[in-house]
């Protein structure tokens, strides 16, 4: 059985020393890997795990013949996953990774942005033309942002405005590239009512064609305490309270279905 596990949180570069990232540690993925290797690997039931981990993720000890792939930003994750799904038959993908929703595409100082908006206002006033919301949005979208030079450090002499563009939803690409892969996704909210969490998880299952979704709330994650709902076809099939329980629930489901 060929399995992909993704772990940790991606980082998107602002400049040579600054990044936008998230709080994902990779500990849950680490536990899942350990449980699968310790309890399912036998001569008659061989598994091979490709472990795709963000650079700062907490890693398990990757044992032969399993492989570790280190990634940084969303683009690097996309490249590795696409190559793995293309090069082999992937039976299961457990997508624990917290992939950034946005990347930094352009940057502008506060003074530059204010100057361009002022120019727009003055131009419309001179022409006696009414200023609309679309006019302002067009200026913001087309303003002369500096293309990022990721090899240098930005000079701290003015407040900065960052242009954030949406990253592709990588989980939604998995089944398109590999329809037979059994996909397990994770949905994390923060301080959300249980009803909202389950609804968000069910939406992920529909849009990404996940076989299972593990729904969890950041407010209930403390160390190894990790409450989560295992959801299949819109129904909660298991409730877990630790990372160990989540890992074992996934293992039991995969190897009994």
Image: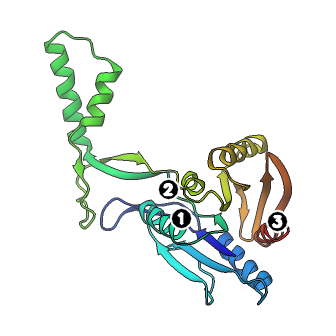
Q: Is residue 121 visible?
A: yes
Q: What percent of the width, then of the height, locates residue 162?
A: 34, 48
Marks 1 and 2: in contact by CB < 8 Å? yes
In front here: 116 or 11?
11
Which residue position is annotated with label 2?
Answer: 100
Of circles 1 and 3, the one toward us is 3
Distance Cα–Cα, label 2 vs label 1: 7 Å
Q: Which residue is at the front of the view, 146 or 231? A: 231
- Residue drawn at (22%, 49%), measured in percent from left and top? 146
- Image point (50%, 77%), residue name: 69
Please tell me the numbered disc located at residue 253: 3
Q: Residue furthest left?
A: 126
Q: Earlier in the sequence, mark 2 or mark 3?
A: 2
Residue position marked by numbered label 1 in the rendering: 9
Q: Quadrant of the C terminus?
A: bottom right
The label shown at residue 67 is none
Q: Mark 2: which secondary structure?
A: loop
């Amino acid at each position: 059985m060929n399995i992909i596990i993704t772990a940790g949180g991606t980082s998107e570069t602002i400049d040579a020393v600054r990044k936008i990232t998230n709080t994902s540690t990779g500990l849950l993925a680490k536990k899942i890997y350990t449980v699968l290797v310790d309890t399912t690997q036998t001569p008659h039931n061989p598994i091979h795990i490709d472990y795709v981990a963000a650079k700062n993720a907490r890693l398990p000890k990757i044992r032969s013949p399993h492989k570790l792939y280190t990634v940084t930003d969303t683009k690097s994750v996309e490249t590795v996953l696409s190559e793995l799904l293309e090069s082999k038959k992937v039976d299961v993908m457990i997508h624990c990774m917290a992939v950034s929703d946005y990347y930094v595409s352009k940057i502008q100082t506060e003074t530059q942005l204010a100057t361009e908006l002022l120019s727009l206002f003055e131009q419309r006033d001179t022409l006696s033309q009414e200023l609309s919301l679309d006019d302002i949005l067009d200026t913001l979208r087309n303003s002369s942002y500096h293309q990022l030079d990721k090899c240098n450090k930005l000079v701290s002499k003015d407040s900065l405005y960052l242009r954030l563009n949406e990253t592709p939803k990588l989980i939604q690409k998995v089944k398109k590239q590999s329809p037979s892969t059994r996909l397990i996704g994770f949905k994390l909210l923060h301080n959300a009512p249980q009803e909202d969490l389950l609804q968000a998880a069910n939406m992920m299952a529909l849009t990404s064609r996940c076989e299972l979704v593990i729904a969890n709330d950041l407010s209930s994650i403390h160390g190894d305490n990790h409450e989560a709902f295992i959801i299949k076809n819109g129904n909660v099939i298991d409730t877990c309270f630790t990372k160990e329980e989540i890992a074992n629930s996934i293992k039991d489901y995969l190897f009994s279905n």
